[in-house]
Image (tube, rainbow, N blue to C red):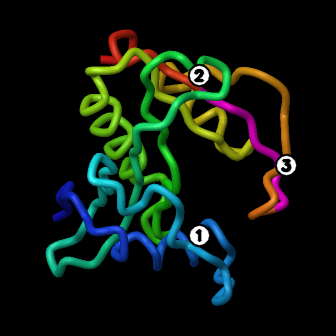
Amino acid sequence: MTRLVELDASDVHDLRRRVLRAGDGAADVDWAGDHDRTTVHLGVVDEHGSVLAVSTWLRQPCPLHPAEPAVQLRGMATDPAWSSGGLGSLLLSEGVRRASDVGLVWANARVEAIPFYERRNWTAVGPEFTTADTGLPHRLVTCRPAATS
């Protein structure tokens, strides 16, 4: 049995390192904004409290709409043993639901993950870019909470 919980910033580090930084022990996984009082770290845990999936939600303007209040999704990761089990969808739905007081939610999504977001009514916008942290291609994805609920 799994359940959705709020986590401390330190609780998301292991999955960020293993999944998003390919296990690089030297990778910085304590990111700017992680400890802001308005930042929320959501996770899915099993019956023993083991963290199976994580996501971070912070108040951050979208580069394409800097004057509009927005929430950024960062660091969404699922333990590979639990991938394709709906945990990412659960985190995404709950994060967007909690961001319903703003008009825009956005993320820098790995290109390989864009179909995941598009199936959930997010839109890929702008050109592809490579992030310095990962060296992987990304695109900005957005959603309007009212349109996805």
Q: Is residue 137 magenta?
A: yes
Q: Is residue 98 magenta?
A: no
Mark 2 and mark 3 lie on one chain; the one further toward the N terminus is 2
Task: Please provide the residue range marked out in magenta.
Answer: 135-141
Closer to the camera in the image, 69 or 111: 69
User: Residue 42: percent from the left, percent from the top?
Assistant: 30, 54
At x 38%, y 47%, the residue is 86
- View extreme (top): residue: 147
**Is residue 28 rendered to the left or right of residue 126?**
left
Closer to the camera in the image, 81 or 94: 94
Q: What is the number of the mark on residue 130?
A: 3
Residue 54, above or below 51: above
Mark 3 and mark 1 lie on one chain; the one further toward the N terminus is 1
- Judging by the rendered image, the residue that carries numbered circle 2 is 66
**Is label 2 in a helix, a strand or a loop?**
loop
Q: Residues within 10 Å of mark 2 (few under 14, many from 20)?
A: few
Q: Are discs 2 and 3 less than 8 Å apart at CB?
A: no
Which quarter of the rendering shows the C terminus? top left
Residue 145, above or below 130: above
Whole-angstrom CA distance, mark 3 to mark 1, is 17 Å
Whole-angstrom CA distance, mark 2 to mark 3, is 21 Å
